[in-house]
Amino acid sequence: MTASENLGVLRLDAQGLRLWRAGQEAVSLDTSAENIAADCAFAVPADRARLTEISVRSDEHRHLKQALPFILEDEVIDPIELMHFAFTPIDGDRYLVALASQADMGSWLESLGDDFEGAFVHEALFLPWQPGEVCLVVETRSVLLRWGQHQGARVEHDLLAPLLNALPTAADAVIVYGRDQVQNLALLPDVLRERAQWRQGHFGTALMLVDRGQKFIDMRQGAFAPSLPFKRWWQSWKPLAIALIIGAVLQVASDLAQYWRLKDDNIALRAAIEESYRQANPRGSLVDAEKQLDRQIAEYAVGVRGLIFTEILDRVGRVIAVSSELTLSSINYSDSAGEVRLDLLAPNYDEIEALRERFTTSGLNATLETSSQRDTQVRARLKVTL
């Protein structure tokens, strides 16, 4: 997390949850009201959380999340299974670790409400700091201080001097924010009192000098990481979702009505098709009228030999009709063979031969396949081709 110019810091104190802005006094909040802006971060109480730095070998980076509780097991009093560990890389093999109890994390989240999406930052890191300095904010019952880039804590007034004396590096300057200069400076060790710079102010005053490019470690990791804000999204998209649902229901209703109407039209159309088909072919089963008619019509179309049944039937009929003595018993047409076979009855063979000659004259080839005499008539079969 990086500090923004409009950063708001939420802190829990004796007066409850309060919002601090740079240069402003704290404002009490009711989390049920929409007073918590999107840029707010929660200041994790420094007396309930701890910051520490560790060095990790490069081959352990991948498993640091699982190994971290065991690495710090000797440095915490509470059982590690009850602690929450958050970490972020500093540089190289160095990592910054922030730890607090899982119970405290859950309690803070509950006090902020389900809709809070901001970061959890150790409150000491919100104080301005420069190398060689110690920054203090003296408050009613305790002192919030920061003495390093990643070091800070909250102590009671009478423990401030021993803590400052125990720092590994002596401070070149001590910046003190408070309400009463005399009382505030009296809390410092004698050696540091001469280096102190007292400033009238409070936590909000100190926020004015926070480095805007500073990156904070967010303790909302693992089980406490922010979940997707489905509830807030739903409130934003609820009107559109309702409109879409109504539109979808109306569309489905329209589609169903159209489906039933088209179904009735289809039944009526199929009945009309069947009626029309039966006019052309009153017998036989009906499966697919269109395909069946196409196949039947194709039988009368031009074949591989260029024959058209109706054309050759017309020519054959005209030739036979010349003689009233001839009787046509049957006619068979073969498109694949390109021929017509005729069964005829004639009074004598001369009529048959005369018929063959008329076929030849009209451009058709007629071949006598069989003939037989029965009583006074001759039965003959002719094959006629182009």
Image: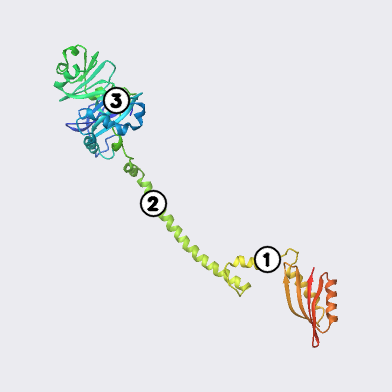
Please indicate whether residue 334 sits to the left or right of residue 191 in the image: right
Q: Earlier in the sequence, mark 3 or mark 2?
A: 3
Badge 1 marks a residue whose secondary structure is helix
Q: Position of residue 256 (x, y in %)?
A: 44, 60
- Tag 2: amino acid: Ile
Q: Position of residue 234 (x, y in %)?
A: 34, 44
Please indicate whether residue 162 sits to the left or right of residue 365 in the image: left
Q: Quadrant of residue 61?
A: top left
Q: Which residue is mark 1?
A: 298
The image's mark for residue 152 is none
Q: Circle 1: is it few (<14), some (14-19), or many (20+) Cα within 10 Å? A: few
Tell me, yes or no, if residue 22 can be seen here.
no
Q: Badges 1 and 2: C-beta atoms under 8 Å apart?
A: no
Badge 3 marks a residue whose secondary structure is strand
Quadrant assignment for the N terminus = top left
Question: Which dot, 3 or 2, sits closer to the camera?
Answer: 3
Please indicate whether residue 361 sits to the left or right of residue 277 in the image: right
Q: Which residue is mark 3?
A: 54
